[in-house]
Amino acid sequence: MEALYGILWQELIIFKRKFWSTTIGAMVSPTLYLIAFGWGLGSGMQVEGKSYMNFVIPGIIAMNTMVVSFSNTANSINISRIYYKTFEEFMVAPLNMTVYALGKIIAGAFYGAYSAFLIISIVSIFGSGLTITPYFLSIALLNCFVFSAGGFLAGLVINSHADMSKFNNFVITPMSFLCGTFFPIDKMPAGIKYFIHMLPLTHTSIALRSVGEDMVHMLLHIAVLLLYFAVLFIAGSRYCKNVE
């Protein structure tokens, strides 16, 4: 626990020093999406029997928590490995690599959760009617942990910033737009729809809109996200130990 506390304390110090840049950076993209797709393009539209604004806000929260959690963890690990060489210092320290992985993933998930808090604060000012429940918060937090764990693994495996950008272009960006964030996936061709249903962000987007959904489907979303997190966390921890 002392080692985990030390890692989280280091991340907290970094967050405090970069508070304003982190806060403003986390607000820019979702605010632009809200203006363009919510108040602009979606003004007066209805999707699934409700206003498009109420439909798109959970999608923006799902997308932004994914991007922020993944990017913060992946870039932190990638830079510490390739440029600052601080990753090697952790490996030679008397520190369990599983604890190190957990600490970095928790830190990345915190950034994602903070971005969700900012979005909820923004839309609350304008009276969006967004319903915040314990289930909603649990799904958003699980999404942060899933993509923070994915970012940790990607930061270990990918060996350059150029390759990291390619990974974002081919994996993160398509998920941002295709996993039910801005439009229902039911309108997509059957083959593509089944594939998209297998992706974690799809379950997050659906679950964040799950008012009135039955308990089986609600538990299914949680189970899928937990499975993704477990697989990514185990894979990242083992790869970290192999490198050590």
Image: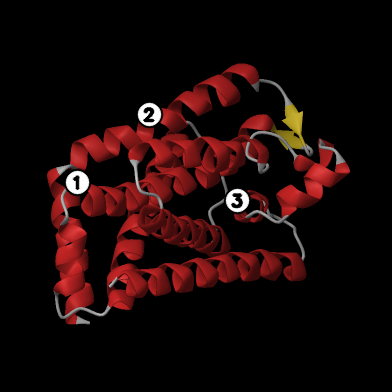
**Residue 44 in view of the camera:** yes
> Looking at the picture, which amino acid does disc 3 mark?
Leu
The earlier-in-sequence mark between 2 and 3 is: 2
Quadrant assignment, res 99? bottom left
Residue drawn where x is 42% and y is 50% of the image: 70
Residue drawn where x is 32% and y is 47% of the image: 75
Dot 2 crowding, Cα within 10 Å, few <14, some 14–19, many 20+: few
Q: CA distance from mark 3 to mark 1?
A: 31 Å
- The reply to whether discs 1 and 2 touch (Cβ–Cβ < 8 Å) is no
Q: Residue 120, position in %: x, y?
A: 45, 43
* Front residue of this view, candidates 68 and 129: 68
> Looking at the picture, which amino acid does disc 2 mark?
Val
Q: Residue 151, position in %: x, y?
A: 41, 54
Q: CA distance from mark 2 to mark 3?
A: 21 Å
- Please tell me whether mark 1 sits on a helix, a strand or a loop: loop
Mark number displayed over residue 140: none
Q: Is residue 103 above or below residue 24?
A: below
> Looking at the picture, which amino acid does disc 1 mark?
Tyr
Q: Quadrant of the N terminus?
A: bottom left
Q: Residue 142, position in %: x, y?
A: 50, 62
Q: Which residue is mark 3?
A: 201
Q: CA distance from mark 1 to mark 2?
A: 28 Å
Q: Is residue 235 above or below residue 80?
A: below
Q: Which residue is mark 1?
A: 83
- Please tell me whether mark 2 sits on a helix, a strand or a loop: helix
- Viewer-nearest of discs 3 and 1: 1
- Please tell me whether mark 3 sits on a helix, a strand or a loop: helix
Q: Which residue is mark 2?
A: 28
- Viewer-nearest of discs 2 and 3: 3
Residue 188 vs residue 28: left or right? right
- The reply to whether discs 2 and 3 touch (Cβ–Cβ < 8 Å) is no
Residue 20 vs residue 196: left or right? left
